Image: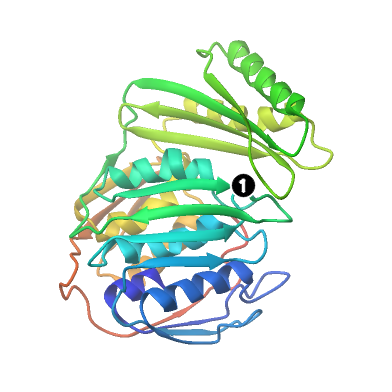
Amino acid sequence: MALAAILQRPLEIHNIRAGRKKPGLRPQHLIAVKAMTLITAGKVEGAELGSTRLYFEPRQIVPGSYSLDVGTAGSTSLVLQTMVPALLFAKKASRVVITGGTHVPWSPCFHYLKEVFVPGLRQMGGAIRVEIERWGWYPKGGGKVIASVSPVTGLCSIDRTWRGELQDTYALSAVSNLPVSIAERQRNQVLKRYRGHGHEVPQIELLEGPSQGTGTVVFVGARFENGAVGFTSLGKRGKPAEKVADDACSDFFKFMASGAAIDDHLADQLVLYMALAKGRSSLIAGRITKHLVTNMWVIEQFLPVKFEVDVEAGRVSVEGIGFSAGKENWSGDLVVPAEKGDEASEKN
């Protein structure tokens, strides 16, 4: 929908989430559809819970101030990431307030957006800012994220095939409406794991996030000369605080031992911008996930680009089209049949 909005071309999708236990659109998808319809003054058909078909006819991208409520713990970050590509090519800045889940399974948590996605997009010339006013956990949701998106005339290419020197490591251990001792146990386990692996002990922030619900999280991040990476682990009933910390740390140590320059999740989030940018962009991820493959396939249906993929090396390259706002970059209508179950295997 973001690409359809940018190109101002109609889109029809069939068999949406056909292989899932609950097929069709879920609440967070519906809010994303509503958001795109709002910001393009568009026409939509099939925007109903459980719908497996969607027709979207965007018009002009309309900047402004928008407020959206998922109504559940559905991911605020996934809704925002649907809107950002289009709003980047609006004529003026926009402000978006989204209420829902901010730290929930199968999606980037707020701190990943702020510490990894936003800096990654900034490298390409995209200027967005995100703030959190209230945290939203599964199942209550109720979190509140505020994003400001500044317009661009175009995006520049990136080379994320090398990390550069490690500049900083840090971690966040947070709870909402739970004893702070849980956050302290998480922090202590992070320190223990880092010392055990011979890594420099990171700066660790303890937080009690304001929320309507309860939850815990450990976020481990690192800033390199050529960009940032981040790894998240959420707590849940029956999962010890030490295990929450272990999962995030293990992902970080695995990344450090690899030849990757970018974490797997950021790879599938940046390929859209790489295809729109001017010039050749490349990245090296730890692995080529099914999410990444699916995203590249969809982009190739919209744009005259062809991604080059070296699965063994985790390398992805593409010559971007140099899209600029107000320029006719592509023509033709599009019908994309969603592959059955293509969303289920690799959850972000």
* Residue 169 % position (x, y): 47, 22
Number of marks in picture: 1
In the image as oriented, which residue stretches furthest toward the left? 327
The vertical placement of 292 against 13, above or below, is: above
Q: Nearer the viewer, residue 268 or 26?
A: 26
SS at circle 1 = loop
Quick one: quadrant of the N terminus? bottom left
Query: Horizontal and vertical percent for residue 327?
Result: 15, 72
Q: Is residue 109 left or right of residue 297?
A: right
Task: Identify the residue at horizontal 64%, vertical 51% (top origin).
Answer: 136
Residue situated in front as seen by the camera: 161 or 53 = 53
Colour setup of the view: rainbow
Query: In the rendered image of this protein, does residue 207 appear above or below residue 143?
Result: above
Q: Would residue 330 be found to the left or right of residue 285 on screen?
A: left
Label 1 crowd (10 A; few <14 / some 14-19 / many >=20): many
Classify residue 284 by image quadrant: top left
Q: Is residue 347 visible?
A: no
Relative to 180, say whether 193 is above or below: above
The residue drawn where x is 50% and y is 12% is: 200
Residue ID at (65%, 79%) = 49
Horizontally, is 203 left or right of 237 in the view? left
What percent of the width, then of the height, locates residue 303?
Answer: 28, 70
The kind of residue tagged 1 is: Trp
From where the camera sits, is residue 207 visible? yes
Q: Residue 135 in the image: state x and y as whole percent.
A: 62, 47
Tell me which residue sits at (52%, 18%) in the image.
Answer: 202
The residue that disc 1 covers is 135
